[in-house]
Image: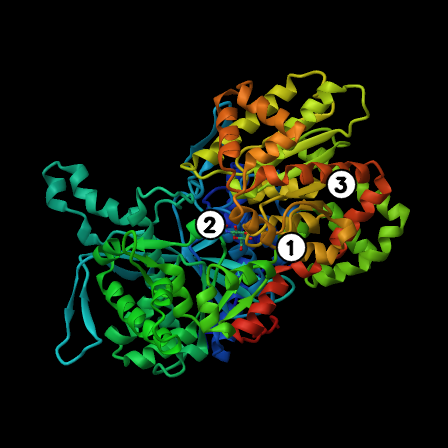
Amino acid sequence: MDLRQGIGLRKLGKTADEFQQDLLSNLYYRRGTTVESASARDAYEALAQTVRDHLAERRARTAAAQFASNPRWVYYLSAEYLLGAQLEQNLLYSGTGDLAAEAVKALGFGLEDLEDLDVEPGLGNGGLGRLAACLVDSLATRDIPAVGYGIRYDLGIFRQVITEEGQAELPDDWAFHGNPWEFPAPDDRQAVGFYGHTEPIPGSTTRKVWVPGEVVLGEPSHMLVPGFGTETVNIIRLWSAKASEASFDLSRFSAGQYAEAVQEAVRAENISKVLYPDDSTELGRELRLKQQYFLVSCSLRDIVRRFRLRNEGWDTFADKTVIQLNDTHPTIAIPELMRLLVDEYEVEWEQAWEITRRTFAYTCHTLLPEALETWPVRMFEKLLPRHLEIIYLINMLFLREVEARFPGDHDRLRRMSIIQEDPERRVRMAHLAVVGTEAVNGVAELHSKLLRETVLDDFAALWPAKFQNVTNGVSPRRFIKIANPRLSDLITEGLGDDSWVGDLERLAGLERLADDASFRERWQAIKRANKVDLAAGDPDSLTDVMIKRFHEYKRQQLKLLHVITLYQRIRQNPAADWVPRTVLFAGKAAPAYHAAKDIIRLIATIAARIEADPVVSPYLKVVFPSNYNVTLAERIIPAADLSEQISLAGKEASGTGNMKLALNGAVTIGTLDGANIEIRARVGEDNFFLFGLDAYEAARARINGYQPRHFYERDEELRAAMDTLTSGVFGEVGRRVADSLLGWDEYLTLADFRSYLECQEQVEKSWRDPARWTRMSILNTAHSGFFSSDRTVADYAARIWRVAPVPVPRED
Ligand code: F58
């Protein structure tokens, strides 16, 4: 008997009755409970399992079709995935939403109650982690055989609490109640070495034996990643660190030394204990490097195992494998693949290097020089001694290549070396990533251009063809279809069908409806209803949102200076015809980033002051919902009128929140930074509020000795706002923020202040004309089709990965 057909694939319930039966059987046999005594959690778990089973059946067919075609697989290596809640998405992608609603009703529950129990795995910090989630969604939607690899952190990004003291952080034990969406796969466990020493192999100059001093196990579990409107179900594989049996010291335990007995095991399992919340502190840095190598080592062995299921030898490895490095965090994969090939599989260095270079591609997500990862050589030497030797050899051969092209240019060699010498010896991960890959890409046009012209200019001069752009995108399913059902229904009605969800450029068909008054009224009514749901402020006020990580370059402080100025204007002239605004901030600051936390605290202080002021509060409200995450984003974005994208030009690599907001009909006020430029080019200059210096003007201002005081002295309103901060009425924190702006103002906040304020006046002028505003809003949605992550993935597939779809046959 063909076993595969044997398992098959048990027919899953397609009618309401059958679905209900499946749900009940999960309730009885997996939860071990009954209808009478089922709690909401029992119902939620049983439902999740039932939905998961539907996807698992498709997964089985996907794996069969993909392995049979022996394609070039895309492996996405990312230290972070911000997946968002799973239930609603999986209901949509499996087409079981209506069946589920009916079935749980019979158990006495509403689907919404159960959705509240669906915790989002917060395995990422911000845009980079969420991009990974959007890309795996679109990979499956595009039928591309792919696996996403990551770390299953026990504790995700911290839970943020906002008090009068600002931000406090609590641990996020996201899987406390278990995670019904994952399948453990203990058989695919891998052993990962750390520390130790290397030994020469007689007769070989390149091969070495690495004798690790510590071995930790990596245990995978996978989550299903269904495609939308297709049969494909890919997976992401997340690794958990497990101590080996040998690390439990039974003799110590028997002697009553309980803590000592488990010490080694605890140390091993700490590797996947917690996601690093983007800290600049040296403390615990070694653990982060350990995490990176842990992810890389487990994933590469798994990739090799999968390659060998269908292929022999190494000649075709790069034809069958492409590994995308999501920023430099997994870059040790380059020396690790070299180590596997050369030391373990005895491939010659030159061939191994050729394979490695052809296998990897690297995406860079930053322009801030301080965000380019480097590791102290001594840390590497201790933790990964063999990898350091391999990096030295890669570097020596690379520098020879540079020397041959630019003879005698020692300064260039020093700049380009993978090893930084001064002030201390460090490994430059971005250089390693550029040297060891076939393609390097930035995440928006401007970003890719600035990478070529600034941070990676020497490399672009050497290998111009290697540098590419792939503009980011977002999942239309999660960020409009699921997040904004009212607007989605109206769009479907307006366009005649819902094919836009899988083909977002079709939104362009809305353009003609922007001039239809009754369509505009319905559009506006939906925005209002979404604001009522969000309940952040008066639904008739201009809902002005700034939602993103807190960072000085993003300039939440500029928004705050606007708020202070509005406050002062209203106080001076309370009888004037003010446009009521609700200013919503949300986002987390890295726990050790004190300047960013000061800004959060200052927002909280100013919000309270305005709230308490009867003159100002009818027109101005500042809200700060705590713990911004994907779930909260899905509630805020549909309710936004104005999208704040006000980073200093040349600093934000792309932004993706800007795309989500435009897609949902928020109009952007923004600088010429990141993907804002591309959004403006598409939605049209008239439907975008532009202000501020451009990237070149900003760079020049710095070179020419920018003086924030100069702006302070020449702008009365700016001076009034700054003086209020300095006066201490908003506490010490106000003083600190003002001091930093007046003293240095790294991100030219004061230089852009006047331009920003004038632009906000244009915003208000447009807002006073609802027909005009709504037209702008519709046109933003209509021209956001390009920003689908389905397009992003198609770009990667065509230009970087050179892979084609492998469709999965339907169930017969
Ligand atoms: C973000 N980077 C960029 N990094 O800032 C944003 O412009 C871009 O749209 C997005 O990537 C996707 O390309 C980002 O989110 C991080 O979160 C790092 C995680 C590791 C620690 C340092 C921050």
Colour scheme of the picture: rainbow
Measured as percent of width and height from the top left, residue 252 is found at 11, 42
Label 1, secondary structure: give it: helix
User: Residue tagged by mark 2?
Assistant: 29
How far separated are the C-alphas under marks 2 and 1?
33 Å
- Identify the mark nearer the N-term, 3 or 1: 1
On-image quarter of the N terminus: bottom left
Which image quadrant is residue 682 in? bottom right
- Crowd class of label 2 (few under 14; some 14 to 19; many from 20; radius 10 Å): few
- Crowd class of label 1 (few under 14; some 14 to 19; many from 20; radius 10 Å): many
Q: Give the residue at x 76% y 39%.
A: 763
Q: Amino acid at mark 2?
A: Tyr
**Label disc, if present, on residue 527 of the rendered structure:** 3
Q: Are marks 3 and 2 in contact (CB under 8 Å)?
A: no
Residue 431 visible to an observer of this rendering: yes
Q: Nearer the viewer, mark 3 or mark 2?
A: 3
Measured as percent of width and height from the top left, residue 356 is found at 37, 74
- Identify the mark nearer the N-term, 2 or 1: 2
Q: Nearer the viewer, mark 3 or mark 1?
A: 3
- Identify the mark nearer the N-term, 3 or 2: 2
How far separated are the C-alphas under marks 3 and 2?
45 Å
Residues 180 and 212: in front is: 212
Q: Amino acid at mark 1?
A: Arg
